[in-house]
Each structure stands twice: as structure tokens, then as C-alpha cells.
Image (cartoon, helix red, strand yellow):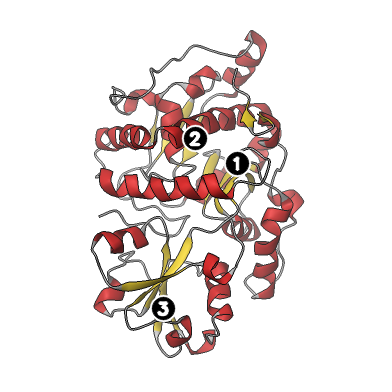
């Protein structure tokens, strides 16, 4: 069973010493059916030399080997040689215990946040990050309850578990449903086991539509799922974030990192099971358990989210201030942040947009 905590906390191989996994340290073969890898440079000599001069770019996965947008595509871009095509040396860290600290300090350069709100909270807390890509303008969060709870109002007087920080979108859902947050017993949970709602340990639990909900359904369990979409609450999911100083000094290299990553994402949207197999091979090579059936289900849902929630007329990953604004307003309205970072500082809306011609990614 694969369980997924809140972004900024990692479960995969957390007990291992921190290490960057370069291409040679991952699986040595590409699963049958995958495109043939090629490391041939596709850039002109000047740009290629400039990218190589940047040195290694370290990407830190917030969920280890998870078949999620912004994670799966990084493994595939590495395995199929797309980063090498951009003359980039990319290392992947899968076992960090504090993802944002690594990237904010400059010891790593790129990671993935759960949403715009999560990114803004991290920046407000002192993280030196800039959002550079948003997978979609919808939320992947959910609340799951046991079968006896048929309305979120019924959580009044009961226990709701959350991971690390209660996402603002969960607060919005409860408020829209008429629940009284002051009457709900909120507990920080580090178990990450969605079967708690079946056992009655908690009556409600923060979850991801693309993870804990899938786990409960695979058990044929009786439970209820509540999503932001049911309450017409806007949101975002899976934000790529870069170290702000590194982005300032090496914007071209970061753009080419994202070009390779988005090229891999396009491939994974067209070849879902093949990409999951690629990531699974890397996980097994690293000695990390990997449930192919679960991860196929994870990517199936996130693939649908990505395809259905990209900004109209824009390429996948292109983000906007308007897209982030509702979550920024919610953080202020619900008192999560007294001072929300300015969106012009928190996100770069041009870097990924310039990689597209219309809705088509420009690939050399």
C-alpha cells in the first residue's frame, strides 16, 4: 500500500542518508515499450555550453517514487535522455526529510509543492522559492469520512486528522458545508493511513483524491469522499518551485529543465502505463517498494486532472496570477497568513509560457 503525506514531508526511504540519484544510479534498462533513450544534445553549441556550465541541477521529489504530475515526468525525462538533450546534468533526491529546506538553502534547486496555497505558505514561512509551473487549476485535496458521516456538518464534535498543516482548501470546504471549525477536534496525524476512518480512530481525514481515496476504494471500503469541486471551490495542484536565487542567475537552464520535463509529461499523458513502469524500475533499483497497480491508478487520476484543468488556450504547466489569486485570498480570509506573499514575487508566469507556441511545447 502506498500512502501519501502532505507535500513538504517525504515517506519514501526516509530513513536513508540523503543522496542524489543520477541517471547511472537508477535502473540500467528502460522498460519494454518506452521510447529509445538518446543523450544527443539538441541545442546549439553556445547554449549547450552555457547549460553545462551551470553544473548539476538537483530535483528533490517530495514523495519519493510517486506517479504524480511533477514527479513522474522528472524520472521519465531523466530516463529517456531529455535532460541530456538540453545539455543538463540532473540529479534526483528521493529520500529528503525536509524538501523545502534543501531547495531554499540552495543545496538543491527544484522541487514540487502541493498547490499554490502550499507554495505561498512556504514562502511566507521564509522559504526562498518561486513557483514556475502549475499542473492544473483544480485541487487534488479531499476529505474522507467514515460511512456514518454523510455531511461535513456532522464532523462538529468529532475528530478530523490532518497532515502537518491543515490545507486552507479543507477549511473552505468545512465552512461552505456549514461545519463549525471551533467544534471539530483537529489532530495532526503522522500515520498517513486512510483506514483510520474505517477503524473509527478519526471520523474525518485530510486526503488526496489521487492517493488515499484510491487506497480506500481498492479495499472496497464504505466511506464518503468530499472534494473542493463539490463545493465549487477553486484551487491548483502540483506546483514546480525553484530556488529563487538559482532561478535569477540561471533562468535559461531552469527553462530548459522545464522544457525537458514538460516534454516527458507530454509523453506520459500519451503513454501512461509505460511511464509508470519507468518510474517503477527506478524505484526497484533504489530498493524502494513500488505498487504498480496503485501508481497506475494515481497517474490515471492525475492525468485526467491535468488534461481537464489546464488554463484555456495555454500549454500544460503555464500558470497565471488569476489562477493563484483565489488561494491567496483564502489564506488571508481564513487567517492562515496575516501577510500573503505578493504573487509577482511568488510565481514566475512567463518562464513556462515562453516554452510554448500556442498549446504546443517547442522541442528542438
Q: In this rendering, does residue 96 appear at all? A: no
Look at mark 1 in the image and give the residue it sits on: 317
Vertical placement of 182 versus 253: above or below?
Answer: below
Q: Nearer the viewer, residue 100 or 327?
A: 327
* Looking at the image, residue 265 lies above or below residue 338: above
Distance between the Cα atoms at labels 1 and 3? 33 Å
Residue 245 screen position, x and y as percent: 67, 39
Residue under label 3, please give it.
Answer: 160
In the picture, residue 341 is in which quadrant? bottom right
Task: Give yes or no for contact between labels 1 and 3 (Cβ–Cβ under 8 Å).
Answer: no
Mark 2 Cα shell of 10 Å, populated few (<14), some (14-19), many (≥20): many
Quadrant of the frame with the C terminus: top right
Dots 1, 2 in contact, CB < 8 A: yes
Would residue 306 be seen by someone viewing this image from the given angle?
A: yes
Which residue is more in the foreground, 337 or 280? Answer: 280
Q: Is residue 308 above or below residue 149?
A: above
Give the residue displayed 46% in from the left and 15% down from the top: 39
User: Which secondary structure, mark 1?
Assistant: loop
Task: Report helix, strand or loop for mark 2.
Answer: helix
- Counting residues from the start of the chain, the first of labels 3 and 2 encountered is 3
Which numbered disc, 3 or 2, marks the residue closer to the eye?
Answer: 2
How many neighbours does mark 1 have within 10 angstroms: few (below 14), some (14-19), or many (20 or more)? many
Q: Where in the figure is residue 12, as x and y percent of width and height? A: 33, 48
- Nearest to viewer (mark 1 / mark 3): 1
**Are the residues at dot 3 and dot 2 in contact (C-beta closer than 8 Å)?**
no
Residue 277 is situated, as x and y percent measured from the top left of the image, at 31, 34
Query: On the image, numbered disc 2 is attached to which residue?
Result: 265
Give the spatial CA distance, label 1 vs label 2: 10 Å
Q: Position of residue 358 (x, y in %)?
A: 69, 32
Which residue does the image show at 27% across and 75% down from the upper left? Answer: 198
Amino acid at each position: 500500500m502506498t500512502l501519501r503525506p502532505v507535500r513538504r514531508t517525504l515517506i519514501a526511504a526516509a530513513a536513508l542518508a540523503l543522496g542524489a540519484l543520477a541517471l547511472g544510479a537508477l535502473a540500467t534498462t528502460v522498460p519494454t515499450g518506452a521510447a529509445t533513450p538518446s543523450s544527443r544534445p539538441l541545442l546549439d553549441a553556445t547554449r549547450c555550453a552555457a547549460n553545462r556550465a551551470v553544473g548539476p541541477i538537483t530535483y528533490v521529489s517530495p514523495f519519493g517514487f510517486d506517479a504524480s504530475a511533477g514527479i513522474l515526468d522528472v524520472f521519465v525525462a531523466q530516463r529517456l535522455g531529455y535532460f541530456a538533450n538540453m545539455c543538463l546534468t540532473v540529479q534526483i533526491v528521493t529520500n529528503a526529510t525536509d524538501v523545502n529546506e534543501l531547495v531554499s538553502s540552495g543545496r538543491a534547486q527544484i522541487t514540487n509543492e502541493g498547490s499554490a496555497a502550499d507554495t505561498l505558505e512556504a514562502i511566507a514561512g521564509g522559504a526562498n522559492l518561486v513557483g514556475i509551473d502549475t499542473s492544473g487549476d483544480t485541487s487534488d485535496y479531499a476529505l474522507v469520512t467514515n460511512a456514518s458521516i454523510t455531511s461535513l456538518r456532522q464532523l462538529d464534535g468529532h475528530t478530523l486528522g490532518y497532515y502537518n498543516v491543515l490545507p486552507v482548501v479543507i477549511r473552505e470546504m468545512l465552512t461552505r458545508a456549514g461545519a463549525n471549525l471551533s467544534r471539530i477536534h483537529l489532530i495532526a496525524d503522522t500515520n498517513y493511513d486512510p483506514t483510520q476512518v474505517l477503524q473509527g480512530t478519526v471520523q474525518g481525514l485530510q486526503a488526496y483524491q489521487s492517493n488515499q481515496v484510491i487506497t480506500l476504494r481498492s479495499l472496497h471500503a464504505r466511506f464518503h469522499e468530499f472534494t473542493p469541486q463539490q463545493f465549487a471551490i477553486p484551487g491548483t495542484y502540483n506546483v514546480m518551485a525553484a530556488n529563487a536565487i538559482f532561478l535569477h542567475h540561471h533562468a535559461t537552464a531552469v527553462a530548459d529543465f522545464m522544457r525537458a520535463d514538460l516534454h516527458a509529461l507530454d509523453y506520459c499523458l500519451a503513454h501512461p502505463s509505460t511511464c509508470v513502469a519507468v518510474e517503477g524500475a527506478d524505484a526497484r533499483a533504489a530498493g524502494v517498494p513500488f505498487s504498480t497497480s496503485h501508481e497506475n491508478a494515481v497517474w490515471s487520476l492525475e492525468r485526467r486532472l491535468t488534461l481537464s484543468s489546464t488554463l484555456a488556450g495555454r500549454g500544460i504547466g503555464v500558470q497565471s496570477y488569476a489562477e493563484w489569486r483565489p488561494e491567496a485570498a483564502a489564506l488571508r480570509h481564513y487567517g492562515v497568513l496575516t501577510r500573503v506573499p505578493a504573487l509577482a514575487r511568488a510565481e514566475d508566469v512567463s518562464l513556462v509560457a515562453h516554452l510554448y507556441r500556442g498549446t504546443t511545447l517547442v522541442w528542438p
